[in-house]
Amino acid sequence: MKYMNKKMFVNLNLIYVLLAVIFQAFAVILVKKASPQIQSLDVLSIFLFAIALLCLFCQAIVWQQALKHFDLYWAYLWMSLLYPLLLLSSVFIFQEEIKYTTIIGAFIIVGGVIIMHSEDE
């Protein structure tokens, strides 16, 4: 670790940011999956909510690690990737219909992340 170059160190720390995005996406997906059964308080919905809370806890831990290594604006910029992830999950997991304007908006978000990140290199 002592002899790693700066670029490799930044890439390893980027894992914290990406894990934060993934944990938050899983939490949102699990809550959506559990929400139809919440009125009856069945075991599956309670389990899914508990796992969602665990995902949010893990997200908070890795987010703190990310903030130790990156500026807030830079780390939070990557949290914008949550929206395209949720868009994909709404289509593939929940079979929800999306409009072309939603897809264009997701591309704009990802494009913005790429443009702002390229400024730092």
Image (tube, helix red, strand yellow):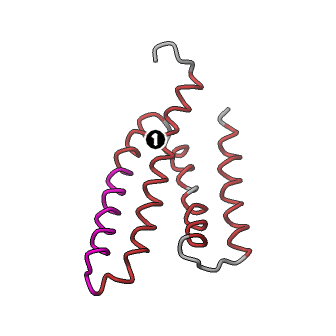
Q: Position of residue 105 (x, y in %)?
A: 69, 66
- Residue on which disc 1 sits: 16
Query: In the figure, 18 relative to 93: above or below?
Result: above
Residue at the limit of the structure toward the bottom, as seen here: 39
Quarter of the image where one finds residue 53: bottom left
Quarter of the C terminus within the rendering: top right
- Amino acid marked by disc 1: Tyr
What residue is at 47 percent from the left and 60 percent from the top?
Answer: 25
Q: Nearer the viewer, residue 5 or 77?
A: 5
Instruction: Find out whether residue 29 is within the magenta segment.
Output: no
Magenta residues, dominant SS class: helix
**Left or right, 116 with reference to 9:** right
Q: Nearer the viewer, residue 18 or 80?
A: 18
Q: Which residues are magenta?
A: 40-59
Query: In the figure, 72 relative to 9: above or below?
Result: below
What residue is at 49 percent from the left and 37 percent from the top?
Answer: 70
